[in-house]
Image (tube, helix red, strand yellow):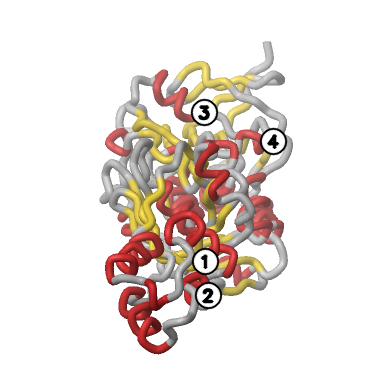
Amino acid sequence: MTEPAHYDVVIIGAGAAGLFCAFTAGRRGRRVLVLDHANKVGKKILMSGGGRCNFTNMYSGPDNFLSANPHFCKSALSRYTPWDFIELVEKHQVPYHEKTLGQLFCDRSSKDIVALLLDECRQAGVEIRTHTPVTVEQLGPPHHLHTERERIHCDSLVIATGGYSIPKMGATGFGFDFARQLGLAVQPTRAALVPFVLEERKRRQFEGLSGVSVDTVSQAGQGTFREGMLFTHKGLSGPAMLQVSSYWQPGEPVTINLLPDLDLGEHLRGLRRERPRQQLHNALAELLPRSLAQRWCDLWLGSHSLAELSDRAIDACVEACQQWRVWPSDTEGYRTAEVTLGGLDTNALSSKTLACKDHPDLYFIGEVVDVTGHLGGHNFQWAWASAHAAGGVV
């Protein structure tokens, strides 16, 4: 039988974290192999940000992440900042721009970020194989692995397999299953940064509003965000809904302020004095998309002139527009979720190196770990920072 191929480092997963860790280790003279079962590297990078890849956020920090241990991410994030990745982007002359709230996107295409990572890997002598499912036979070190073609031994093993989100991109629960097999705790997982689905009766109420968007302050659980909301044919989406989905629990409401910059009660009372003959739906159409204003009146507020509105009726308008409570029936699930909330319990890992405390020279990085970012480039920053932490020591 042929001797196993030996590498200093094997990384399972050729996504953002895996590729970054690979060249970080390769720069240190390590012989690195990256294995992925998918047909190409960086598939989620390519589709992210509408094809423009929101590769980091200038204001990314620990407060932008959810975890059972909110302190765990601080070490890695402090040692590899957004500005460090921006420096790498500028080194490769990738044109980029800020969109909103510190979110940085490629001017041209997400392909620029994948090309950057692959170029760094080439320069560091990293070997990458796609179409290569792998099985971990035995932990060492050396760790024993095998693919369909060969046996492989390595001194350090890095799990960078991501989560369940977007299975059509090849996402699996490999990392979570592997952790459980080792007896490691895995925090409960669910789809996050994901649109909401409404029950059929509610969907019928909002029929015809699909595509209508509005600026909101939206809240679920402990999460409150000032972002845009979008009506869809299934329910509610847009940045505001994706953000609060990470904090929402089934059976709980989402509270939405459709007019966050206005004291609507005072505004309507003023209009009642100044323009008593104006219809309520027309007054609201000056503040909201016309179709939305009309639907709100049809559903809850009625057809009245402002002169006909009592103070109690105005209070009802305020509640309907600025304290609108909606009970989603579900989310769209992993099929469209940007990330997986939960993952490997951080108590199993060193916050400095992402090394597994119970298994020498085994590392978990990126989305497989119970660190989940807000929308807007933060999850990529966690990928870069956690990969940098592990890549510097493997």
Residue type pointed to by label 4 = Arg
Is 210 rendered above or below residue 183? below
Nearest to the eye among marks 2 and 3: give it: 2
For the image, the number of numbered tags is 4
Q: Estimate the spatial distance between the alpha carbons at disc 3 and disc 4, rounded to whole Å.
A: 20 Å
Give the image quarter of residue 181: top left
Residue type pointed to by label 1 = Ala
State the residue position of label 4. 129
Residue at 28% x, 66% y is 312
Front residue of this view, candidates 136 and 368: 368
State the residue position of label 2. 282
Front residue of this view, candidates 164 and 257: 257
Is 154 rendered above or below residue 267? above
In the image, taking residue 371 as reference, residue 380 lies left or right, namely: right
Q: Quadrant of the N terminus?
A: top right
**Secondary structure category for the residue under label 4:** strand
Q: Which label belongs to residue 173?
A: 3
Residue at 51% x, 54% y is 380
Going from N to C along the chain, the mark reached first, 2 or 3, is: 3
Can you see residue 353? no
Q: Estimate the spatial distance between the alpha carbons at disc 1 and disc 4, rounded to whole Å.
A: 55 Å
- Tell me residue 364's x, y (percent): 43, 37
Residue at 60% x, 72% y is 90
